[in-house]
């Protein structure tokens, strides 16, 4: 019937310390002061599962379709159509929808917008997907890795910068990537390990990274899906970067704030973009990968990196970081001590993500 968003305030009218939406607004204001607007577009993957006899989610995929399959292998096309029509009725413009690589896995992407609107839309999107799935007698899961031997669900985040209404990710003179874009990318690459806790916030997230086209190394390239950051083949307003490590369990307000802040630091500090890695990192041997930095292997490592990061503390604030870390440390410890990881994932994440 309606959706309601607000900025949380204290009784005296001051900003609540733990309001992620207010935090993202502050980062957007910083970009605006520098003369930039960051446009964000999300490609969100999810699984559709059957319900058991008791009405609870069962770990049985809705179909056995694969990438870009159509009916009858793809049983979810009518559900995706209903999702897209519902989003359109709510003022959100889906651009594409299709069956993804895993059985019962789907993806819907919607048109880019400013960072705050994109975060709001992503939250609405997840609510709509779950509601439409339930209406059709199914369960929609945004768990990063719901099936151990199948592809995980990523949240590919597309970003570009505009200045005076013009996309500056490509130089108008040479047609090459602009120097501002290079610095923005360099800033994100320089801080990516420190912010991974917010881009991959669950223990289950790290079962996805490094497998089935999810990145493991800190690298970039053009048109190369094996990289952490790729520059897709595009022109005009579609020129952008795509960050491929985040998954669909993120808090988008915190994630977008940290990604954009890292990019803005890169611009302010004139960071130099390292050379592209023009290789297929899914199959590359050690001669190529041995000198590349790696993303954290597990939640505990990600917690330590965020805890020791002055950058993260500066962006999200010491109080919010302290509270966030306290929750994630407990989660990381519970994961370590779990005797049955599959059972832990099923009880800890599957019903709730």
Image (cartoon, rainbow, N blue to C red):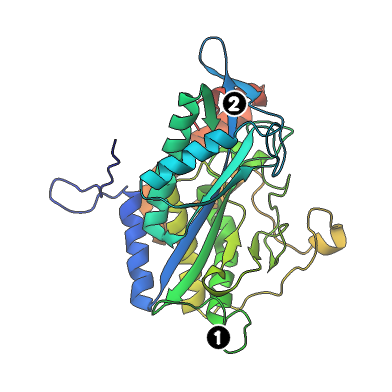
Residue in the picture at 87% in, 57% down: 285
Picture layout, residue 161 above or below residue 246: below
Report x, y in % for residue 204: 61, 36
Q: Relative to the observer, which residue lies in front, 333 or 235?
A: 235
View extreme (top): residue = 53
Mark 1 neighbour density, 10 Å: few (under 14) some (14–19) many (20 or more):
few
Residue in the picture at 62% in, 88% down: 174
Answer left or right for 306 relative to 131.
right
Report x, y in % for residue 30: 35, 70
Q: Which residue is mark 1?
A: 172
> Which of pointers 2 and 1 lies earlier in the amino acid sequence?
2
The numbered dot on residue 49 is 2
Picture layout, residue 238 above or below residue 35: above
Answer left or right for 201 relative to 150.
left
Q: Relative to the observer, which residue lies in front, 341 or 130?
A: 130
Q: Which of the 4 quarters of the picture holds residue 235?
A: bottom right
Report x, y in % for residue 125: 44, 43
Location of the N terminus by quadrant is top left
Picture layout, residue 150 above or below residue 320: above
From mark 2 to mark 1, how far is it between C-alphas?
Answer: 47 Å
């Amino acid at each position: 019937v309606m959706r309601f968003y607000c900025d949380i305030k204290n009784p005296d009218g001051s900003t609540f310390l733990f309001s992620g939406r207010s935090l993202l607004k502050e980062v957007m204001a910083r970009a605006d002061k520098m003369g930039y607007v960051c446009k964000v577009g999300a490609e969100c993957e999810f699984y559709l599962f059957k319900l058991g006899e008791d009405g609870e989610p069962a770990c049985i995929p809705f179909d056995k379709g694969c990438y870009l399959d159509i009916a009858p292998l793809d049983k979810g096309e009518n559900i995706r159509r209903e999702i897209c029509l519902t989003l359109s009725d709510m003022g959100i413009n889906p651009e594409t929808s299709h069956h993804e690589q895993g059985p019962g896995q789907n993806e819907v992407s919607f048109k880019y917008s400013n960072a705050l609107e994109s975060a709001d839309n992503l939250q609405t999107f997840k609510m709509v997907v779950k509601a439409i799935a339930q209406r059709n007698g199914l369960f929609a899961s945004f768990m990063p890795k719901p099936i151990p031997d199948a592809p995980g669900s990523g949240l590919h985040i597309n970003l570009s910068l505009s200045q005076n209404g013009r996309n500056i990710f490509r130089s108008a003179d040479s047609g090459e990537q602009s120097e501002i874009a290079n610095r923005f990318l360099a800033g994100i690459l320089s801080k990516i390990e420190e912010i991974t806790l917010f881009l991959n916030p669950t223990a289950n997230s790290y079962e996805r990274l490094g497998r089935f086209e999810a990145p493991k190394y800190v690298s970039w390239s053009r048109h190369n899906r094996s990289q952490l950051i790729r520059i897709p083949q595009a022109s005009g307003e579609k020129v952008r970067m795509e960050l491929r490590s985040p998954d669909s369990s993120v808090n988008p307000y915190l994630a977008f704030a940290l990604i954009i802040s890292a990019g803005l630091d890169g611009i302010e500090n004139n960071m130099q973009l390292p050379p592209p890695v023009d290789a297929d990192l899914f199959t590359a041997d050690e001669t190529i990968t041995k000198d590349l930095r790696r993303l954290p292997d597990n939640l505990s490592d990600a917690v330590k990196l965020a805890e020791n990061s002055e950058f993260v503390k500066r962006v999200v604030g010491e109080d919010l970081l302290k509270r966030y870390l306290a929750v994630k440390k407990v989660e990381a410890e519970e994961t370590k001590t779990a005797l049955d990881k599959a059972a832990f994932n099923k009880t800890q994440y599957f019903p709730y993500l």
